[in-house]
Image (cartoon, rainbow, N blue to C red):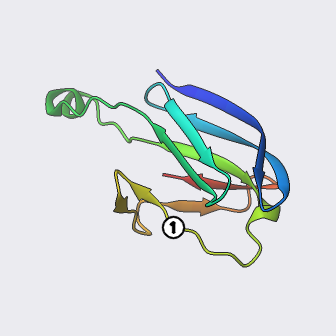
Amino acid sequence: MGDTFNFENLDYGDQIFNTTLISYNDRIGKFTFNSTTGEFSWSMPFDYDTQRVEENPILAHEEIKLPKRLFGSSRFNTTVNGQPISARILAIDPFTSPNAMVLHY
């Protein structure tokens, strides 16, 4: 069961923007955005029962769509449960949308 949230009128760096967060596996909860630091956070419970995963291989996949104009030459850090995400776990897609950068986790 997946979930999609559209968040409107977020404010960062004197820019108002909208974003979409998609979870392909479970419901999204506790979404927050810190307009001072530019940090997003949310929860997505996931059943890591090994029997379930062995019977039906699952790729835990989430994505967030952010306006390209927010990126410029800035850098960003991504973490899951406080642990840095390596390049093998995060795919940055600047091509799917002309106006959005899609970050696939």
The answer to which image quadrant residue 58 occupies is: top left
- In front of the other: 48 or 55: 48
Residue under the point 16% across and 34% down? 50
Residue at x 74%, y 60% (from the top left corner)? 95
Circle 1 sits on which residue? 77
Q: Which structural element holds mark 1? A: loop
For this orientation, the residue located farthest to the top is 1
Mark 1 belongs to which amino acid? Asn
Identify the residue at horizontal 15%, vertical 28% (top origin). 51
Residue at the far left in the pictured view: 51
Between residue 15 and residue 105, name the one nearer to us.
15
Q: Number of callouts in the render? A: 1
Quadrant location of residue 43? top left
Asked if residue 56 lies left or right of residue 7, the reply is left
Q: Position of residue 21 (x, y in %)?
A: 62, 39
Q: Is residue 23 above or below residue 40?
A: above
Q: Residue at x 55, y 36 (%)?
A: 31
Q: Which residue occupies the extreme front position in the image?
A: 36
Q: Say if 99 sits above or below 52 in the image.
A: below
Residue 3 image position (x, y, % from top left): 55, 26
Left or right of 25, for residue 51: left
Q: Please rate how many residues cluster around mark 1, counting C-alpha atoms within 10 Å: few if below 14, some from 14 to 19, many from 20.
A: few
Residue 105: % across, % down: 48, 51
Give how far across and how far down residue 15 sits, in percent. 84, 56
Image height of 39 relative to 50, above or below: below
